[in-house]
Image (tube, coloured by chain):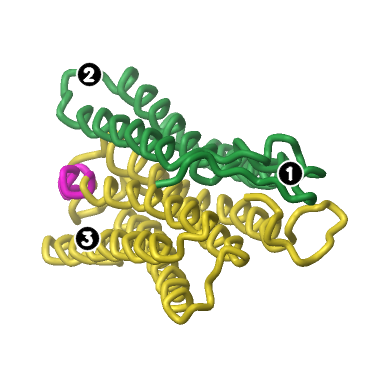
Chain colours: A yellow, B green
Amino acid sequence: MTNQTHSEETTTGLSHNKLGMWVFLGSECLLFGALISTYLLYRGRFADGPAPGDIFDIPFTSVSSFVLLMSSLTMVLALSALQRGDERNNRLWLLTTALLGAVFVGGQVYEFTTFLREGLGYTTSPFSSAFFTLTGFHGVHVSLGVIFLMSLYVSSARGNLHKERAETVELIGLYWHFVDIVWIFIFTVIYLVPSPTS
Amino acid sequence: MSTETEHTTESDKSDDEHSHEHPSDKKYFQIAGILAVLTALEVATYWLESVPGEILIPVLMIMMVVKFFYVAAWFMHLRFDNSLFMKFFVSGLILASVVYAIFLTVFEFWHKG
């Protein structure tokens, strides 16, 4: 967003916090790149355990993906509302985004427990280790995002989040959209691209 | 829902000229609609068993990149913000792509799959 909320002067004329967030997100590309590459290398090594093509529930994961995708919409609406000075709608959209994120995490917990019941544990095979590490790391990112969103909601409910602090919401929003972008990648590469079967 | 959001403070005027205007909420809903349709198309490919991987995988990759672009450009405002933000993000993205393409090549992923 713009610099209307800046109280500091910077050499670039840009917010240091926002610049820092973009650098952080750039570095996160390397983290998730490592995890996705490792998964791609190991997805065919499932030993005697279930193969990815046997165990993935695409319809279920599609619904979770859709929920996370729509949470990006509610996040940007929360920011838009605060920039207009509409604190009530800002709280409403923040809460909706947090709820959608929680639904996604709940879906992931359900998926993991189903896989465990079907014999796919963390150490069952190189495939399972890579899969749980990648999707687990993403799930932790979403969970942290939900905590950040709820912190913003509480801050707003206490009357501490006004139009002048819209950049704070924007920074959390950038993080949230990035987590969504990573899932767009994971959903296609891990779930939708045809996987090996046993 | 709002109309067009405008930024007219003095500090903005010194910024990159693309950083001034942001989309309306209506536009955000339109983008979300496009993303939903693309996701539905992606998921539909799951039931297209007769399509060979040589066609299916590039189609999925294209849809994924388009979705990526829409979220980054519109929801993350890269389309409107100062270009320096995009440079930092794209640098990380390119670095990751090159490093892990080399990584996968070293482990013969492209041949063995």
* Discs 2, 1: same chain: yes
Tag 2, which secondary structure? loop
User: A108 or B53: nearer the eye?
Assistant: A108
Q: Residue at x 25, y 39 (%)?
A: A196
Q: Nearer the viewer, mark 1 or mark 3?
A: 1
Name the residue tied to disc 2.
B51
Q: Nearer the viewer, mark 3 or mark 2?
A: 3
**A117 versus A198 height, above or below:** below
Q: Which mark is residue B35?
A: none
Q: Residue at x 43, y 68 (%)?
A: A149
- In the rendered image, the residue lying farthest to the right is A11
Image location (x, y in percent) of residue A172: 52, 62
Which segment is the magenta one? A53-62
Image location (x, y in percent) of residue B68: 46, 37
Confirm whether the magenta stretch covers residue A54.
Answer: yes
Q: Residues within 10 Å of mark 2 (few under 14, many from 20)?
A: few
* Discs 3, 2: same chain: no
- Report the Cα–Cα distance between label 1 and label 3: 37 Å
Magenta span: predominant SS is helix
Tag 3, which secondary structure? helix
Asked whether the residues under the numbered discs 3 and 2 touch, taking CB atoms below 8 Å apart as contact, a structural biologist would say no
Instruction: Return the disc, 2 or 1, that comes first in the chain's sequence.
Output: 2
Name the residue tied to disc 3.
A107
The reply, left or right, for residue A20 in relation to residue A46 is right
Asked whether the residues under the numbered discs 1 and 3 touch, taking CB atoms below 8 Å apart as contact, a structural biologist would say no
Name the residue tied to disc 1.
B84
Tag 1, which secondary structure? helix
Confirm whether the magenta stretch covers residue A41.
Answer: no
For disc 1, the chain is B
Image location (x, y in percent) of residue B20: 67, 40
